[in-house]
Image (spheres, rainbow, N blue to C red):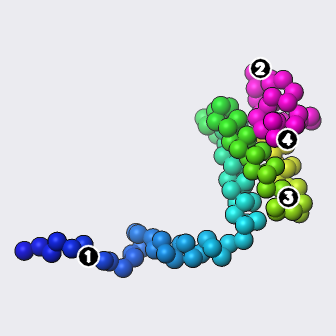
Amino acid sequence: MSDASPQHESPSADRPDFDELTRDIADVPAVEVITTVAVHLMSAAAVNLGLAEDGDQHKDLDEARKLITALAGLVTAGATEIGSYHAAPLRDGLKSLQLAFREESVIPDAPGEGPGEKFTGPVHG
């Protein structure tokens, strides 16, 4: 005879304790969450621009455009919240990615039409 009620098991190594994870993220300052997300977007965009090791295998400019645009929105909106100390390097990284995108494009976008430029304005070298 089987018990119809589900057994409540304690979290194991293969199943995370979501209550513990929720408490952990609550302790992380917003500036750290924002910068971490920005770094992930930057890394993914760089890979899709072909800037990583074995870059040509992963090159996808359409994906890079989406990631750079999302990064531009985050950096632009979050800059006032995280302050210049944290925002400046993110802006520099964003500009580098935008310029790299322009270099990799066979048909360059018009000034102000590149990825993220609706948030940042035209990017010049």
- In-front residue for pair 81/46: 81
Left or right placement of residue 64 versus residue 11 in this view: right
Upstream in sequence: badge 4 or badge 3:
3
Classify mark 1: residues with Cα within 10 Å, few (<14), some (14-19) or many (20+). Answer: few
Upstream in sequence: badge 2 or badge 4:
2
Q: Which residue is mark 1?
A: 7
Alpha carbons under labels 3 and 2: distance apart: 34 Å
Q: Which mark is residue 107?
A: 2
In the rendered structure, are the residues bearing label 3 and label 2 in contact, judged by CB atoms less than 8 Å apart?
no
**Any part of residue 40 in sight:** yes
- Name the residue: 82% across, 53% down: 90
Left or right placement of residue 101 versus residue 25 in this view: right
Q: Which mark is residue 120?
A: 4
Q: Amino acid at mark 2?
A: Ile
Quadrant of the rendered structure where residue 7 is?
Answer: bottom left
Left or right placement of residue 66 versus residue 24 in this view: right
In the rendered structure, are the residues bearing label 3 and label 1 in contact, judged by CB atoms less than 8 Å apart?
no
Alpha carbons under labels 3 and 1: distance apart: 48 Å
- Name the residue: 74% across, 60% down: 35
- Horizontal and vertical percent position of residue 22: 55, 72
Highlighted range, magenta: 98-125
Position of residue 66 relative to residue 109, above or below, is below
Q: Which residue is mark 3?
A: 80
Q: Amino acid at mark 3?
A: Thr
